[in-house]
Amino acid sequence: MLESQRDRHAGLDPTGDPLIMKFQDITAEMLPLVGGKAANLGVLTRAGLPVPPGVCLTTEAYRRVAGDAGLDDVLAALARTAPGATAALAELAGRARDLVLAAPVPADIERAVRRSAEGPVAVRSSATAEDLPDASFAGQQDTYLNVIGPDAVLDAVRRCWASLWTDRAVAYRAANGVDHGAVHLAVVIQRMVRAEVAGVMFTANPVTGRRHEIVIDAAPGLGEAVVSGAVNPDQFVVSPSMEITERRLGDKLVTVLPIPGGGTEQVRHDEPLADAAREACVTDRQIIALARLGARVEAHYGTPQDTEWAIDRSGTLWLTQARPITTLYPLPEGQEGLRVYICLSLAQGLHRPITPMGSSAFRALASSITTLFGVPPGRPSPVAEPGMRLFADMTGILRSRVGRAVFPRVLDIMEARSAVVIRGLFDDPRLSVNRRSPLPAVRRVLRIATRYRIPVRVVQALVRPETWHRRIDQVGDQLRARPAPPSDATAAQRLDHVERVLGSQIFPMLPHVIPGPVAGFLMLGLAARLLRGRTRPGELQTVLRGLPNNVTTEMDLALWAAATRIRADEASARALSGTALPEGPLPPVLQRELTGFLARYGHRAVAEIDLGMPRWSDDPSHVLGVLANYLRLDDPALAPDTQFAKGAREAEAMADELARRAGGWRRPIVRFALRRTRELAGYREMPKYFVILTLAEMRGQLSAVGDELVARGLLEATDDVFMLSLAEARAALGGSGDPAPVAPVAPVALVERRRAAYGRELRRGHVPRVLLSDGTEPEAVGAAPPTEGALTGTPASPGTVTGTARVVLDPVGAHLEPGEILVAPSTDPGWTPLFLTAGGLVMEMGGANSHGAVVAREYGIPSVVGVAHATSRITTGQTITVDGTTGAVTLDEPSQDHRSP
């Protein structure tokens, strides 16, 4: 038997490194030598958990074989190949497999393998980039079961080595940014368990995210049927208190069984055997035993685990594999007990992670707001940052009677899907109302409203809307005239300035600009009430088309005007006509137009709420890309300025029609209300505009701090400062003005870790809009599977359009043909230049009054927002129909294209 081998290592390579290691000799630190799977099996074995005995043929064997295989040219070609170049990656993967399979196996390695081939064994790949905390690489390399005899084991080992170069493994590494040449493969040779029943077990619910809720899938025979998805297994959910809370019995029509001479066979049954659809393949006692074992595994690792298990003919339970569950969203850190968090990043149209400096700035802003609302100092911060996204603790609001009445209604307008999720939590007894009196909340709101004369300003805006533009100009002038540190200011003085502005000067500015748009939308609400029963779907939204005084649409139209002038210059138009952005000096007209645009709007950016993101003035490539998109629009009737003017005329006509339809005493009131709506609602973008203007100024100051840290040798590049927090930057300078000083940091090492974490989070495909402190995503609990071919969301901009979909996850460098329907996770003002040539808009996030919806209405683009899974269910090139009046998105047959970057 394998466990009775005489020597600690069955072989050494010429350098003295082991070729064969027993599980009990393997530790977690040996990952480069044994790979992820073997390292985990070694850890489980040393912990006394029931693992079938086995050995590992280490990566030293693969290094020697691969070194003689001649992979250098393939590796060089892979390094030059983009992650999305599927065909090229597959061709190179095939070349690498052939080279590895053809490479000779040194005699000492062959002897070591043959000595390990005792009895039926499982031969499993164990790569150095596998079963890791942040990427499981599950199923990327091959496994061979019930391998019998030395020749068969040696052949399986060779095929495992070659499986490091399967098409799927190469594509997975490319997508996750893993260097192909840095990955090596060990091979596990493990005693085969003759399983009566087997399966997988997650120690946290992989669908809902709930921690310590164990999910078990089980089917008769070997576990390969469950792992590969070939069988519809039994599934059981076990609570943290070890009670079976759910059981769903599968038909179990497929069984994988060992063949006496070696190998396995898949047996398919025409109908369930022995009433399998009505009888579980494991007993309740076995389910609880499995759950207790899973809890032991998780406790040992300290993180939720994805395990594979088997029960043999004697009833003995075995663990055959364990790896971290890498798809769970990280837990928020906050107060004890069940807490409810809503994702502020998604609410701002930001799917990507936020830089540490951006989060630090947001915390400073949040602190100033909570202080203004009378929250005592020293209270736990309401902001958490799991997954490098911003989440706000809304537990107090949900447990307040006023909060339950008001908060979901706000979300109805801004983020409709989140409103549904929040209302679904009202029945949870753990979140019962404990603050019933509305008086404390009313007093806080009245105090703020009185202090900043908000009711008076709302009335002033309604009475004299023409004065509101002057007020906006005054606020802008005050911001631009704000004293800045002198040019010879120290880095510490610049940090003082940044913290002072973020902590006390931004929020007090907002009450001066918010009352105008508030008045506009109050009037829209009044008109809606007076017109109840007299309007058809989409008519009130039509009134919001072509709104004046919207700084974002003014920006987009300014860029279109620049494109029009660029089109008239042959050299400039030619510079933007290629597939790549121009390099070197730009033609004079293009340079002049770009400079003029950036002089006014260079402080803006994609993901601009993150202070750590470069502004367009830092990197204008996105602006150049949008200009190139604009030049492809050659139909004058579809020109954005023409469409905007058309939308404004339609809006005015609809306002007149609705006033006429109101009739009687309602007519003049509705006419007045809708006129004020159009005059004031466009100012809704100004509060954020001024915040972004301020953040751009603060970014400039922090860049100077980064220069100082680079000069001292503490950072490698200026932008590295944005991978630190404000407190960490101050600590690096050698001082601390933070009320809770942080320990001195080693900035270079810290920045390196942060950039690696940021890169991993950039690749995260799913971010929950609402998250509980136990990891549960309420939207995933009890969610019905989507109906084939039908997507629904919130109507955002009326009209219907059928066209080709373009799925865009990042607008920088995105190619959007005129008339294509833009499908995006969410949007912020940095996206809106793409709207000008889009035929329609579909967003996963947002509500009827979210940023993307407002801009889509102003351009007259049919739009549906809050569409779950839109970017995964719709593919680029697919024909879809967007009905912005009913909120329906109809899909034709999907194309073979994939999502755009």
Image: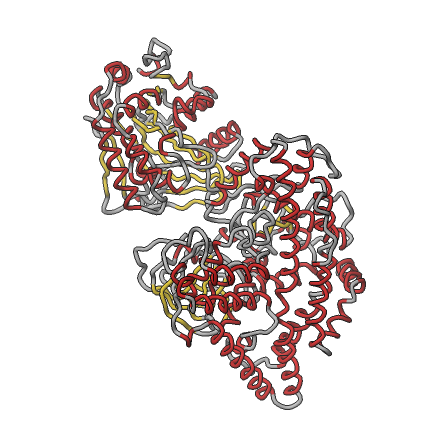
Task: Look at 28% across and 44% down and name the residue there.
Answer: 88
- Describe residue 2's horizontal placement relative to residue 95 as left or right: right
Q: Quadrant of residue 744?
A: top right
Task: Look at 72% across and 39% down and name the residue there.
Answer: 492
Name the image colouring.
Answer: secondary structure
Q: Is residue 648 above or below residue 91?
A: below
- The quadrant of the image that shows the N terminus is top left
* Residue 521 image position (x, y, % from top left): 64, 72
Asked if residue 629 shows in the view, the reply is yes
**How many callouts does the rendering have?**
0
Asked if residue 338 shows in the view, the reply is no
- Describe residue 409's horizontal placement relative to residue 313 as left or right: right
Comparing 701 with 329, the one in front is 701
Comparing 650 with 231, the one in front is 650
Instruction: Identify the residue at the far front of this view.
Output: 588
* Residue 790 image position (x, y, % from top left): 39, 63
Task: Look at 59% across and 50% down and name the residue there.
Answer: 610
* Residue 149 image position (x, y, % from top left): 21, 20
Task: Look at 35% across and 9% down and name the residue there.
Answer: 7
Q: Is residue 786 above or below residue 194?
A: below
Comparing 856 with 160, the one in front is 856
Q: Is residue 159 above or below residue 446?
A: above
Comparing 859 with 897, the one in front is 859
* Residue 354 image position (x, y, % from top left): 57, 47
Instruction: Identify the residue at the far top of this view.
Output: 6
